[in-house]
Image (cartoon, rainbow, N blue to C red):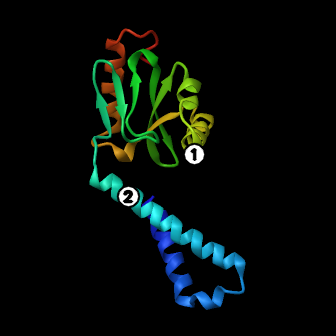
Amino acid sequence: MVVLCIGFAILSYLCYIQGWNAFMGNLFWQAVLVTATLMFALGAMFMAKRAANPLPALILDDEGIIDNAGLIRGAKHLWSNIERIEQRNVYGSTLILVYLKDPHAFIDAQSGIKKKMLTSTYNQQGTPVSIPGKALEGAAGDLLKLLRSYLEKSSVPGAAS
């Protein structure tokens, strides 16, 4: 996210250096300039909001997982709704994947871009709940063991996979 925000900022800056008059006759470059500026502003607001209100990436309790690191911040996944938990490396990044018993119900409860992003994650990973390892403190393997032990304690069949 930071890289994209910086990229949009550089693109906006380069366009502004050329001057708005250089783009007056070219609608395409005007659209690029406005889009880059808006994307930079949205990215900066998003990062500022996250920095101003830092939350733990995951909160575990006897009821389930509260996920503040995934696409849907603050989503609570009950142990009774979790089928299994796995770790996967994708393009050099570690992901903790939480497989839900009814992933479509979770996806359908969302709207707009969040729903589309969850659907894409589901199509790629087989679950809409993907926790990036970079958002977590400590080793992903240790967290995976802890998550599985909570899942086993909840007496859900198929807990250890």
Q: Is residue 147 left or right of residue 37?
A: left
What residue did someone put label 1 on? 113
Amino acid, disc 2: Met
Residue 47's disc is: 2
Name the residue at 47% across, 73% down. 9
17 vs 133: above or below = below
Q: CA distance from mark 1 to mark 2?
A: 18 Å
In the image, what residue occupies the spot 37% across and 47% down? 134
As helix, strand or loop, the secondary structure at mark 1 comes to: helix
Inspect the image, locate mark 1, and give the three-letter code of the amino acid beneath it: Ile
User: Residue at (57%, 45%) from the top-left corner?
Assistant: 113
Please provide percent x and percent y for residue 39. 52, 64
The vertical placement of 129 against 18, above or below, is above
Query: Could you tell me residue 55's position as x and y percent?
Result: 28, 43
Task: Name the quadrant containing residue 60.
Answer: top left
Q: Which quarter of the rendered picture does the N terminus lie within?
A: bottom left
Q: Which mark is residue 82?
A: none
Sort mark 2 into few (<14), some (14-19) or many (20+) by Cα contacts within 10 Å. some
Question: Which residue is pictured at 72% across the width and 86% down the height?
Answer: 25
Q: Residue 53: percent from the left, percent from the top?
A: 28, 49
